[in-house]
Amino acid sequence: MGINRFSKDQQQQVKAAIEKAELQTSCEIRVFVEDFSKIDVLDRAAFQFKKLAMHETALRNGVLIYLATEDKKFAIIGDAGINQHTGNEFWDSVKELMLPEFKKDDLTTGLIIGIAAIAEKVKLFFPYELGDKNEISNDIAH
């Protein structure tokens, strides 16, 4: 199922949420979706983070929301630039905001809530600046 769990409209809603968030912050947010994670979900998220070159942003401020839809697991990974300001407690708090929607199988709303919460926090450290370049695609990766 993976990406197929999202209709074209839902994919567009997630992309629009990322675009809205990135108008508040220079942070780069990406969502990655697959069916299963055959390894620890954080390890798999870290693998995809690197594979998607999320660590190559100029300010080291990439964030990846990783979903393994059939395993019903997810993780959020932030790059070094963000983690020095937020810490793991912040990522856990965002996951707690998303979880009620995920439990209702409303992945789209859960993602939108998480993306908005990430932007709200990281804009304090990485505000949007005029001419800010979008370094990473806003489409859901799979």
Image (spheres, rainbow, N blue to C red):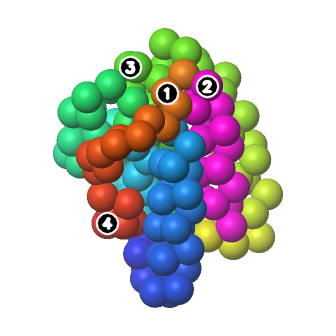
Q: What distance separates the C-alpha of mark 4 from that of mark 2?
A: 30 Å
x, y percent for residue 131:
34, 43
For marks 1 and 3, give the one nearer the viewer.
Answer: 1
x, y percent for residue 67:
48, 57
Q: What distance separates the C-alpha of mark 1 from that of mark 3?
A: 13 Å
Instruction: Tell which of 89 and 139 is nearer to you.
Output: 139
Q: Quadrant of the N terminus?
A: bottom left
**Viewer can see residue 43:** no
Q: Mark 3 points at which residue?
A: 80
The stretch of residues the image draws in magenta is 109-124
Look at the numbered disc 3 and give the secondary structure of its residue.
helix
Circle 4 crowding by C-alpha within 10 Å: few under 14, some 14–19, many from 20? some
x, y percent for residue 17:
56, 62
The reply to whether dot 2 and dot 3 touch (C-beta < 8 Å) is no
Circle 1 crowding by C-alpha within 10 Å: few under 14, some 14–19, many from 20? some
Look at the numbered disc 2 and give the secondary structure of its residue.
loop
Q: In this view, does 112 lie to the left or right of 103?
A: left
Q: Give the amino acid type for the residue marked by disc 4 in the picture.
A: His
Q: Give the amino acid type for the residue marked by disc 3 in the picture.
A: Ala
Residue at left 50%, top 57%? 18
Residue at left 27%, top 34%? 57
Residue 117 in magenta stretch: yes
Q: What distance separates the C-alpha of mark 4 from that of mark 3?
A: 24 Å
Q: What distance separates the C-alpha of mark 4 from that of mark 1?
A: 27 Å
Q: Quadrant of the C terminus?
A: bottom left
The label shown at residue 142 is: 4
Image height of 117 relative to 81, above or below? below
Image height of 44 relative to 111, above or below? above
The reply to whether dot 2 and dot 1 touch (C-beta < 8 Å) is yes
Q: Name the residue under label 2.
A: 124
Look at the numbered disc 1 and give the secondary structure of its residue.
loop
Q: Mark 1 points at which residue?
A: 126
